[in-house]
Amino acid sequence: MLRGLDDTDNKIVGILTRNGRASFTEIGESLGISRVTVKKRVEKLEKQGVIEGYSAKIGHTCSGKMSFLVSLQTRMESFEWAKSKLAESDEVVTLVQITGGCCLLALVQVESKSNMKDFVSRLCSEIDGVEAINFQAVLDVIKGSIGP
């Protein structure tokens, strides 16, 4: 439930989150309101920035790439540089700052284990102050999605 939205807007957002291709007619029928009302509400939600866009979710096995979660801890003076280097890397799909000092967690996609080894080596050589780096292979996605 998103704060600041009424019950109907929350239901519309919920439906679109599960199925971004749901038509205004389908949404209206499931909520007992008109297609025109749904259209106006969705346009308002888009204008307010509640709905930022719609995208397709591609299964991680379809991309032909291997996915890894990489955690990186740096010294404080190196943190901003590390953050910018990871953010500009083509292999990094998602980057978040996490608790535990100067820690970053990245979802990385590469073509092979060899490419992952090269990526980690490049990180260690380009970023001074790396205190720890760990990575795990993603075996399966149970809920959610991976990738652009």
Image (cartoon, rainbow, N blue to C red):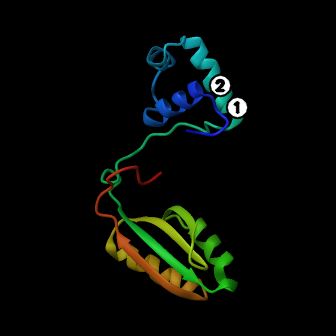
Q: Position of residue 77 (x, y in %)?
A: 70, 85
- Where, by quadrant of the figure, is residue 86 drawn? bottom right
Q: Which amino acid does label 1 sit on?
A: Lys
Apparent side of residue 77 relative to residue 25 in the rendered image (left or right): right
Q: Which residue is drawn at 40% across and 76% down?
A: 135
Which sits in the foreground, 61 or 80?
80
Which sits in the foreground, 89 or 72?
72
The label number, if any, that marks residue 43 in the structure image: 2
Q: What element carries label 1?
A: helix
Image quarter where the N terminus lies is top right
Q: Where is residue 51 in the image (x, y as percent from the top left)?
A: 61, 36
Q: Name the residue under label 1.
A: 47
Q: Where is residue 141 in the image (x, y as percent from the top left)?
A: 33, 55
Q: Position of residue 99 (x, y in %)?
A: 57, 72
Q: Residue at x 43, y 32 (%)?
A: 19
Q: Which amino acid does label 2 sit on?
A: Glu
- The local crowd at label 1, few if under 14, some if 14 to 19, many if 20 or more residues have their Cα within 10 Å, is few
Callout 2–callout 1 Cβ contact below 8 Å:
yes
Disc 2 from disc 1: Cα separation: 6 Å
Q: Residue at x 44, y 54 (%)?
A: 147
- Where, by quadrant of the figure, is residue 130 drawn? bottom right
Q: What element carries label 2?
A: helix
Which sits in the foreground, 6 or 13?
6
Apparent side of residue 146 relative to residue 131 in the rendered image (left or right): left
Apparent side of residue 20 relative to residue 88 in the rendered image (left or right): left
